[in-house]
Image (cartoon, rainbow, N blue to C red):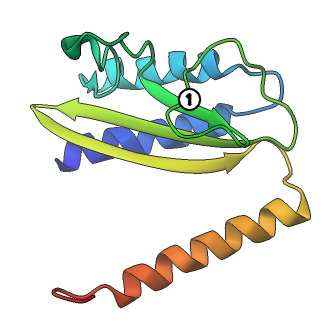
Amino acid sequence: MRRAGLVVAEAHKVLSEAAVPGATTGDLDRLGREVLAKNGATSSFLNYGADWGYPPFPGVACISVNDEIVHGIPGQRVLEEGDIVSIDFGAIVDGWHGDAAVTCFVGKPSEEDAKLSEATRDALWAGIAAARVGGR
């Protein structure tokens, strides 16, 4: 599980750094495929749904821009300065899954977006600090 998580962390770093004005969500997905191949991993997302008769998910990363709901389909959408991008990535290594999402900004965020991101991060860490076995 640790190796799968490390592949996900690497993908987050690579894809976040590539989320620049002019890049497409498809460009980010292609980079995700390279990270998987380099690490001998497979995607948790690619072709998901096909086993149940649904259209298969076409990407290795779910990339949502701005107000898009999670699990955005990568494609020709061009990223612009100020966009907020959510990158959800899953990797399988030796049968173990790693899966996480990260949010990044394309270029410099607006003051309002930066404050929202900071408040969200603070809330996450406060929740983690308060978590206890059996806690409610």
Q: Position of residue 24 (x, y in %)?
A: 71, 19
Q: Position of residue 30 (x, y in %)?
A: 52, 15
Residue at 85 percent of width and 44 percent of height: 82
Residue at 66 percent of width and 37 percent of height: 68
Residue at 89 percent of width and 65 percent of height: 111
Q: Is residue 3 left or right of residue 86?
A: left
Where does the C terminus fall, quadrant-wise? Answer: bottom left
Mark 1: which secondary structure? loop
Q: Tell me which corner region of the image, top left, top right, bottom left or bottom right, holds residue 127.
A: bottom left
Residue at the front extreme? 53
Q: Tell me which corner region of the image, top left, top right, bottom left or bottom right, holds residue 75.
A: top right
Give 109 or 68, whichever is nearer the viewer. 68
Give the labeled residue for mark 1.
Answer: 72
Q: How many residues crowd mark 1 within 10 Å: few (<14), some (14–19), many (20+)?
A: some
Give 90 or 67, whichever is nearer the viewer. 67
Q: Position of residue 8 (x, y in %)?
A: 37, 41
Q: Is residue 96 left or right of residue 121?
A: left
- Vertical comparison of 136 with 116: above or below: below
- Vertical comparison of 58 with 62: above or below: above
- Vertical comparison of 86 with 118: above or below: above
